[in-house]
Image: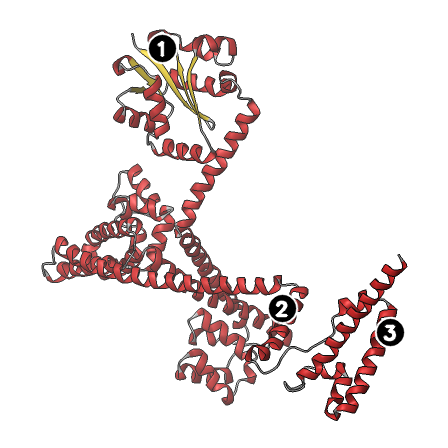
């Protein structure tokens, strides 16, 4: 008996469900369709075997990408190997996507089935999944599905953004539209200004040059010899400038008013600005093609290569096309019309814009277009899948097409493709090594600049974070250090001052007695030695500018004061003892 299991992939995890026997299910397909909408009947048909939830949204995105690409993820492999029976021949696994079914059958050996009853059962599981799994609500399931859908779409869009061929598609489409608009507007300028100066149309054929001349000349009656140099600058031809000047003198055009001239000049300036923007856009397209598809642009040119990419949808799609499709790319209507009427199919499509088709003879146009399409296919695949794109292969392929053209004309045998590709591989490796060296140098320079910028930001933030109080403290510390420096060198001694704490603690009577004793001692010293006059002024002697010789005299009043204080204290103690 073959057991049927169904694998269901959901935003919250994988689910493995068991069903009745295959024969019963296959015979009862109408009953399965009826019971899908009824939860009670559906429970009789389907039974949940295992549920493997995703640990995070990142894991869910990885599994979704693996399922879409047809790759068996490790979580899916673990689920199937754990809960499916060991006898693989007796197991039939139903899956919704044929790609993942083929991958499971190839890697794990389980027989897989898609479509029919499996599709109906998966529809019912999708409808009642929040009831089959315990703890899962309809709201949480919808939120998980929405989040996974957003992340999956964002990843796909990010892939397309990294492949910058989208910008090429938009630029070539805009370039074609600009060509149409410039042609339409310039024809309007020709017709409008032709009423006044009809001879200018025959002299100047270029649309942009005609609009510049119409903007510069204005009224033809004001054109004279002084403006001849400016005409030569615009037309880039002295003969044309002289012809314009002569034609303005004998023109058959009607007179025009000033307000009409203002309108014509403003419209001409718009057309000139559009043509200038068209040139800048063409330069941008060339630079983009040299970065994205250098080999293809070197082979058939930037404009034709960009049209190929735009018509295919992307460079990856173009690389997947065979050479026969590349040859008739852009001629789909003619191809289907020929198939419908059983006529001759077209030989070329967009590839006809290449210069090689125009240079070939009429009988060789089909052969050279087929050969060129083959080389375009090779170049597009090289550009799409190479890590460091270079134009070496495109130049070698272009040489091969040139040799094939000369072979059709002269019969000279071209080189073999193997020899040419060997040379191209050697040159491409050298070019890739040089490009990687340049990129490494640029990266080193960028890192150095980033380090310097970060260091400057850190320095600026540290300066801004320091408060004014901290700055004052630093200034005070620096001042103290400056004062202490001469003391360390031994030039000066610290100033001698009276102890403040003792002065504060002493009472008024003791201070008065001390002053009287100091006065009597100073008077005695004046009589004994006139040199000791400095000691009578202890505050002046204690200044920091006193020399070392006067230090002895400055210290004596302090000693005397201390001695008198101690003697008075002893007298008071003796008096108190006698009273007691």
Q: Which numbered circle lies on residue 26?
A: 1
Viewer-side residue, 502 vs 93? 502
The location of residue 347, given as percent across then percent down, is 25, 49
Viewer-side residue, 399 vs 21? 21
The location of residue 269, given as percent across then percent down, is 54, 70
| Left or right: 182, with 103 as reference point | right
Looking at the rendered image, the disc whose residue lies closer to the viewer, 1 or 2, is 2
Residue at horizontal 48 percent and vertical 34 percent from the top: 149
Q: Which numbered circle lies on residue 500?
A: none
**Residue linked to disc 3:** 512
Residue at horizontal 62 percent and vertical 68 percent from the top: 474
For the residue labelled by badge 2, is the local secondary structure a helix, a strand or a loop?
helix
Q: Residue furthest bottom?
A: 530
Viewer-side residue, 252 vs 121? 121
Q: Which residue lies furthest to the front in this view?
A: 578
For the residue labelled by badge 3, is the local secondary structure a helix, a strand or a loop?
helix
Task: Establish if 555 lies above or below 577.
Answer: below
**Residue linked to disc 2:** 474
**Labels 3 and 2: the sequence-earlier one:** 2
State the separation of the CA atoms marked 1 and 3. 127 Å
Task: Establish if 508 lies above or below 156.
Answer: below
């Amino acid at each position: 008996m073959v057991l049927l299991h169904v694998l269901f992939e959901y935003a919250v995890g994988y689910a493995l469900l068991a069903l009745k026997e295959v024969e019963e299910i296959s015979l009862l397909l109408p009953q399965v369709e009826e019971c899908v909408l009824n939860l009670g009947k559906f429970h009789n048909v389907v039974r949940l075997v295992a549920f493997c939830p995703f640990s995070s949204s990142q894991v869910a995105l990885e599994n979704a990408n693996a399922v879409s690409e047809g790759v068996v993820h490790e979580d899916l492999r673990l689920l199937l190997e754990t809960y499916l029976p060991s006898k693989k021949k007796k197991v039939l696994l139903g899956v919704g996507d044929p790609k993942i079914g083929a991958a499971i059958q190839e890697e794990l050996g389980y027989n897989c089935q898609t479509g029919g009853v499996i599709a109906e059962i998966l529809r019912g599981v999708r409808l009642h999944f929040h009831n089959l799994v315990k703890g899962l609500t309809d709201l949480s399931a919808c939120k998980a599905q929405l989040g996974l859908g957003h992340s999956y779409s964002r990843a796909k869009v990010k892939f397309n953004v990294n492949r910058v061929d989208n910008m090429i598609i938009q630029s070539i489409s805009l370039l074609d539209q600009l060509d149409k608009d410039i042609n339409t507007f310039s024809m309007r300028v020709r017709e409008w200004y032709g009423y006044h100066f009809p001879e200018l149309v025959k002299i100047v054929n270029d649309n942009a040059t005609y609009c510049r001349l119409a903007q510069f000349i204005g009224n033809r009656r004001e054109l004279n010899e002084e403006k001849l140099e400016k005409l030569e600058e615009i037309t880039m031809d002295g003969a044309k400038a002289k012809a314009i000047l002569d034609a303005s003198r004998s023109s058959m055009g009607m007179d025009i008013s000033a307000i009409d001239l203002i309108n014509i000049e403003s419209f001409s300036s718009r057309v000139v600005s559009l043509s200038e923007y068209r040139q800048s856009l063409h330069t941008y397209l060339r630079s983009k093609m040299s970065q994205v598809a250098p080999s293809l642009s070197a082979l058939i040119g930037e404009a034709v290569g960009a049209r190929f990419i735009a018509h295919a949808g992307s460079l990856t799609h173009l690389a997947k096309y065979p050479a026969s499709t590349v040859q008739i790319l852009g001629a789909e209507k003619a191809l289907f019309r020929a198939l419908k009427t059983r006529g001759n199919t077209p030989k070329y499509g967009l590839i006809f814009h290449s210069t090689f088709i125009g240079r070939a003879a009429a009988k060789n146009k089909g052969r050279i277009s087929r050969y060129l399409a083959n080389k375009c296919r090779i170049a597009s695949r090289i550009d799409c899948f190479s890590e460091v794109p270079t134009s070496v292969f495109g130049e070698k392929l272009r040489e091969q097409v040139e040799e094939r053209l000369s072979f059709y004309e002269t019969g000279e045998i071209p080189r073999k493709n193997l020899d040419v590709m060997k040379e191209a591989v050697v040159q491409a490796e050298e070019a890739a090594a040089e490009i990687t060296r340049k990129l490494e140098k640029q990266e080193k320079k960028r890192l150095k600049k980033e380090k310097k910028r970060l260091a400057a930001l850190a320095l600026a933030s540290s300066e801004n974070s320091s408060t004014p109080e901290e700055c004052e403290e630093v200034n005070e510390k620096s001042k103290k250090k400056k004062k202490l420096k001469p003391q360390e060198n031994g030039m000066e001694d610290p100033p001698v001052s009276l102890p403040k704490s003792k002065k504060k603690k002493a009472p008024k009577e003791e201070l008065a007695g001390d002053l009287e004793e100091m006065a009597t001692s100073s008077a005695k010293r004046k009589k004994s030695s006139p040199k000791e006059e400095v000691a009578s002024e202890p505050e002046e002697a204690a200044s920091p500018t006193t020399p070392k010789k006067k230090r002895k005299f400055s210290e004596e009043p302090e000693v005397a004061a201390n001695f008198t204080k101690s003697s008075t204290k002893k007298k008071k103690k003796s008096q108190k003892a006698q009273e007691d």
